[in-house]
Amino acid sequence: MNYSLEKDNLYKKIVELQETVLNLLPESSQCKTIQQLKEDITNDYYTVVVVGEFKHGKSTFINALLGKDIMPRDVTPTTATINAIFQSNKNEIHIVKTNGDVEKKELSLEELKNYTAEADFDPDDIQFIKVFTDSKLIKEGVVLVDTPGVNDLNEHRSSITYQFIPRADVVLFLTPMTSAIKKTEKLFIEENLLKNGLDRTIFIGNFSDSVEDDEYDEVYEFMKRRIENVTGFPNVPVYPLSAKEALQGKVRNDKELIEYSGILEIEEELKRRMESGVQSKEKLERFHFRLEVIAGNLQKEIETALHLTNQSIEELQEHLQSVRNFLDNQSAWEVQIQNYLYEQEDDIKFMTYKSLNYFGEKLKEDIKAKVELFQGADIKNLVESQIPVSIKSQFKNWVDQYGEHIQSLLMKLHNEVEKGLSSSFNQRIQMNHSRQSQLSYETDIPVLNMTSGNANVKAGLIMGGVSTVAILLGGPFFIPLVGMAGMPFLSQKVAEKQLQNLKPELLLAVEGQINVLLEELHRNLDTFIHNQVNTIKNDALDHFNRAIQSYEHLLNEEMNKKQDETNKVVTYQKELKELSIMLEGHFKKIDAGVK
């Protein structure tokens, strides 16, 4: 599969379809949906996310890929924000803040240094930074995402773990050749990369230039075995690299140094995955699916238009009046829909909170057992590493598992509202206010029996995937929940070896932190579900109103045609009668002359 070629061919089909529809069905409800699909294909990016612990050479590697030295790399640690690099002939940066503001500045190395780890700014005030520059790689539709490097990958802000990695087409994971895959890296791979598919990850062993020639093969094989053991897969490709030499080669245009650095093999693999990777295939499938939905809806409009050609002008007038009467009562049935949605929203929240509460109790029991059974001497490690990692892991598992259930409930609700609106045109919206209620669905007008063109809903992404739910965790969610610095009394008790006296206070502190996290997640889920239900309502109403408008237009078009035909017939009949009268008068004159 050649992704770029297939996407271009698909785009041409869509353009051809759009031109035909605008010519034959200019008021089609699918005009907007076709345009949205065109724009999505045009704006489709191939997202490459670079991750690694600090001092692993991520920024140097990104500069090498870009072929220019623009990302700060002299400060340790460097990157403190998420930097997304886009193609542009204009060099500038857009600082996207968490409050929604966007600050634009000219791109320079000095400006980007203001957002490194040693700079005086609050990273939590910035959502991410867009970097616009000109580069051969990103001209091909690639967006490079540089993530903050920290001592422990598991301390990444949740926006990295949940927002970028699940959406990445490829993750480039950098680890040093000489000390590949530490314990913290192993945990990150297991909890974040393997879950999203190993076929999306390229492992890179950096600093190959620091390995002696006579030790190179041994070091490389050890690194490869280590990665294979961690991933559980044999023959995992691992690419040795000297990011420093790659950048030097690109800047100096030294082809020999570029080749020696190992970056060409990585770029070739990246290109191969762009053209034939699983993620690319999934994107094409989603685009094709959306086009199939559009085609199915257009077939229903065509079926309706053909059906109307067999209707008399009186029947068409009756249909048109029915449409107008229905629209006159729009506010009433919109209230019915809103009331139904309120009820269903409460049901979804009820089930979600029930699951969340159960999860919270089980989590507290698990942490309590972990603390009570602890007999080691390294209490600091228990408090600052073991407990936070366990809590983080269990929160993630709940979000991943229950997020799919929330998605299913919201999709079901969307389908019910969509069907109910169609049914209401012919009969009425019938609601059963029990917990199992559904909107009835009956229609004999094909154009009103269309599938929503909302790609997010129909592609199973109404919530942007499970990862969108996880973003609800917000901000620096996964941090050491109970640290030594935050609990000064621990130091003294550890020194006095009062472990048993320490445990009750530790449990109390940890339970308090868990309660805070549960309450925060509860609030965010409440807001999220409410907003999604509103989105469902607005999307369904927009889709239905466009279908009604399309139907109304078809009725008017057919009435106008039939009225024109009637007028032509009447005019023709009148002309024939006038001719007949003229002929009768002419023949009378002839008869009179003959006599």
Image (cartoon, grey):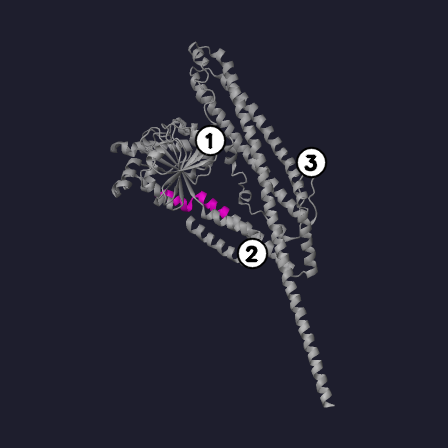
- The residue tagged 1 is 158
Mark 3 burial class by Cα count in 10 Å: few <14, some 14-19, many 20+: few
Q: Nearer the viewer, mark 3 or mark 2?
A: 2
Q: Quadrant of residue 340?
A: top right
Q: Which mark is residue 592?
A: none
The Cα–Cα distance between marks 3 and 2, rounded to whole angstroms, is 42 Å
Which residue is drawn at the image coordinates 65% and 42% (left, top)? 334
- The residue tagged 3 is 434
Tell me, yes or no, if residue 479 can be seen here.
yes
Amino acid on which disc 1 is placed: Ser
Tell me, yes or no, if residue 187 can be seen here.
no
User: Magenta residues?
Assistant: 268-287
Q: Are marks 1 and 3 in contact (CB under 8 Å)?
A: no
> In the structure shown, which secondary structural element does the residue marked by tag 2 occupy?
loop
Side of 118 relative to 369 (left or right): left
- The residue tagged 2 is 26
Which residue is drawn at the image coordinates 40% and 45% (left, top)? 141
Q: Nearer the viewer, mark 1 or mark 2?
A: 2
Residue 453: percent from left, percent from top: 56, 47
> In the structure shown, which secondary structural element does the residue marked by tag 1 occupy?
helix
In reply to whether residue 282 is colored magenta, the answer given is yes
Q: Quadrant of residue 488?
A: top left
Residue 360: percent from left, percent from top: 56, 25
Amino acid on which disc 2 is placed: Pro
- In this view, the residue farthest toward the right is 595
The Cα–Cα distance between marks 1 and 3, rounded to whole angstroms, is 38 Å
